[in-house]
Image (cartoon, coloured by chain):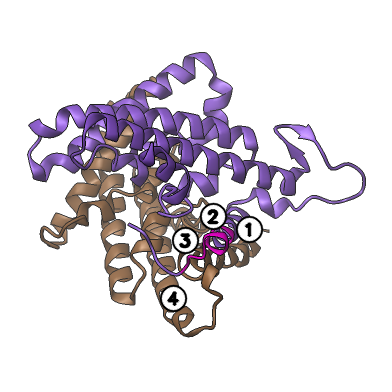
Amino acid sequence: MKQLWEGLFTKNPVLVLALGLVPAVAVTTTAMNGLALGIIAAILLVAAAIVNWVLAPHVPENAKLAVRMLVLILLVVAVYSLLLGRNPGLVASLGIFLPLLAVDELLLQAGGERRGFGEELLRACGQGLGFALVLVVLGVVREFLGMGSIFGRQIVTGSLAPLSLAGSVPGGMVILGLLMALVNLVTKRGGELHD
Amino acid sequence: MTNGLEILAQTVVSGNLVLVHGLGLYALIRHTTNVKEAAKAGVTLLTAMLLGSVLLWLLGPIIPVAPAPQLGFYLLVGLVAGFTAPHILKQGQVSSLERRAVDSALVGLLLLMGRSGAAGVQNLWFALGAGLGYLIVLVVMATIRKRLELAPIPKALQGVPILLITVGLLAIALLGFRF
C-alpha cells in the first residue's frame, strides 16, 4: 500500500515530481475535462505498466525507450478509437491532449524499472489516481474561477464577473504553480526537483 | 512568401507552442538550468520539428484518412523525427537525449499541423516558426532562471512553482499580441 500512498500524495506525479504538466495545464479548463483525462490517463498508465513489465525482460537496454513509446502509441490509438465511437464529444473537447498522452513523460516511465508485478501495479495505480486527483482539483478550481461553476453547475450568480484568465493556458500555469507552492508549504518542502 | 512570413510570425508569437498552447513544459522545467543547455535543447527540437514537417510533406499522399490510423501515423512521424534529430546534429549517445526531442511540443505541433490542413511548404514555415518560438522561450526562461536564483523567493515557491508562475506571466504578456 506504500506505493499507492506515494503516488497519491507523497510522490504525486504532478505536484511533487512535476510530471504530466502539459495535460495538467492545458486540459483542466473544466472539472469534467480534468476528470475525463485523469481517468483515461490512469487507465493508460496501468495498462502501459502491465505491458512494459511483461515485455521488459525481452527488450535490449538501448531499445527500451523506443519500445515503451510504441506500446504507448498503440494504447493511445486504441483508446482514441474506442472513445471516438462512443463519445466523440469528449474526444473533441480533449483536443490534441488525448493523443499527446502518447509522449507524456509520466506514462512513458510506466514499467521502466524492474520491480515485482504487484509492486509495479500498485505504483501505477497510485500514480494514476494521484494524477487524476490533481487534474480534478485543478479543473474544479479553474472552472470555479473562470466560469463560476463546478461540474457545469452554476455556483456564482449575479454581477460578480468571473476571472476568464483562469480558463486560459497562462492562467493554468499560474494556478498550478500556486497549488504546488501550497503543497510545499503544507509539507514544508520547496526548491528541489524530485526526479 | 508573405503567407510563409505570416505563418512564421503567427507561430513564433501569437501561436507560441509553450506560452499559448502549454506544450513542452517538461523541457522547460528540466532543460533551462543554463542558457547553453536551453539553446541545445531548443535547437534539437527545432531540427526535429523541421524533420517532422519534411516527413509529413513527403508522406502526405499516404496519410491515412480514418481518424485513429491518422493519429497513429502522426505519433509515429513524431517518434521517428524525435529519435533522428539528435543523430543529425551529431550529439552522440547521451542518456535521455532522445527524450529531449520526442516531446509534447514536437508531437503537438505535428497534430496541430494536421488539424490546420497545412500542406507542403506551409508545413516547413509552421515548423520553423514553432521551433524558433520554442527556442526563444527556452533561452529566455534560462536567463530569467539565473536571475531567480538570486531573488529572495519564499521557500514554498522555489523551484518548479516559481518557474510555472513566471512562464504564466510571460504568456499573459504575450496574450497582448492576440488582441
Palette colour of chain B: brown
Could you tell whether A117 is left or right of A139 in the image? left
Q: CA distance from mark 4 to mark 2?
A: 20 Å
Name the residue tied to disc 4: B145
Say whether residue A34 is visible: yes
Q: CA distance from mark 3 to mark 2?
A: 10 Å
Name the residue tied to disc 2: B20
Q: Position of residue B39 (x, y in %)?
A: 31, 70
- Please report the bounds of the magenta region as a residue range: A182-190
Check contact, mark 1 vs mark 2: CB within 8 A: yes
Q: CA distance from mark 1 to mark 3?
A: 12 Å
Name the residue tied to disc 3: B12
Q: CA distance from mark 4 to mark 1?
A: 26 Å
The purple-coloured chain is labelled: A
Q: Secondary structure at mark 4?
A: helix
Q: Is residue A74 above or below residue A65?
A: above
Q: Residue at x 44, y 80 (%)?
A: B149
Q: Residue at x 29, y 38 (%)?
A: A110
